[in-house]
Amino acid sequence: FGTVGIIGAMKEEVELLHRNVRVTGTRSKAGIEYVTGELHGKQVIFCRSGVGKVNAAVCTQVLIDQGVDCVLFTGVAGALDPGLDVGDIVISTVCQQHDMDVTALGFPRGVIPFQEQSEFAADDRLVGLAVSAGESLFPGRCRTGKVLSGDQFIASRETVRELRETMGGACVEMEGAAVAQVCAMNGVPFVIIRSMSDRADGGAPDSFEAFTIEASNRSYRLVESMIMRM
Ligand code: ADE
């Protein structure tokens, strides 16, 4: 991978990129700033997309148009799998939009009508790099799994159960599947890295407040370690 594109949605998720990337230039497109530079000798372009699938989709396309060879997403998520603790890391195997809902026309939840694919698979080599980095940085606290995305902050046990039952999924967030879909449309490899800030239940707002910085930093450390292994 020559140039690595890295996206975070919120300022906490890109804070350590700002601190650690040796910046060589910046440019703006559609109101988002793209920072070019070097991280541990590797060429990177990173940006803060803003929250949600539309922001993430636009950012991903702009990064790809700037010539990145792969896209990594770094940030936080709500755990769906009860075996995940706050701080634990999920490395995407596949991503799907949980709020794509054309069930009224008979399509299963999450299925994009009249399209071959609705689940987008992460790149095996990037997943492998992430797993190796995770095993050495956070032993026993990293796993691979399905990432569900939608334009909703999930904060109810009922919704968690429904998402797990209807779609599976290790964690839920608001950008990954959009990044994944745009990467698939362009034939660009990607992986989504998410550290758990909450359990997507009634306690999620407080947990998110309390743990977003720490979880964001754990996700960053994994991404940084991937970059050093490339
Ligand atoms: N990101 C972090 N926690 C989340 C949640 N509970 N729902 C959606 N996105 C999240």
Image (cartoon, rainbow, N blue to C red):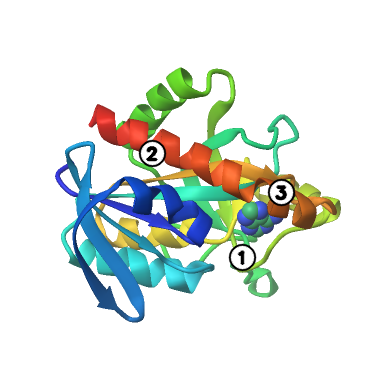
Q: What element carries label 3?
A: helix
Numbered tag placed on residue 210 in the rendering: 3
> From what the image shows, is residue 205 above or below residue 214?
below
Frontmost residue, 133 versus 61: 133
Quadrant where the C terminus sits is top left
Query: Disc 1 marks which amino acid?
Result: Phe
Q: Which of marks 3 and 2 is nearer the N terminus?
A: 3
Q: Residue placed at 43% from the left, 35% from the top?
A: 221
Left or right: 230 in relation to 100:
left
The residue labelled by disc 2 is 223
Query: Disc 2 marks which amino acid?
Result: Val
Query: Disc 3 marks which amino acid?
Result: Ala
Q: Residue placed at 32% from the left, 71% from the top?
A: 33
Q: Residue lying farthest bottom? A: 30
Would residue 88 be seen by someone viewing this image from the given angle?
A: yes
Dot 2 surroundings within 10 Å: few (below 14), some, or many (20 or more)? Answer: many
Q: Earlier in the sequence, mark 3 or mark 1?
A: 1
Q: Is mark 2 on a helix, strand or loop?
A: helix
Spot occupied by residue 226 in the image (x, y as percentages of width and height): 33, 33
Frontmost residue, 208 versus 169: 208
> From what the image shows, is residue 93 above or below residue 112?
above
Q: Residue placed at 45% from the left, 62% from the top?
A: 178
The CA distance from mark 3 to mark 2 is 22 Å
Spot occupied by residue 227 in the image (x, y as percentages of width and height): 28, 36
Quadrant where the N terminus sits is top left
Spot occupied by residue 11 in the image (x, y as percentages of width and height): 49, 61
The image quadrant of residue 171 is top right
Numbered tag placed on residue 107 in the rendering: 1
Dot 1 surroundings within 10 Å: few (below 14), some, or many (20 or more)? Answer: some
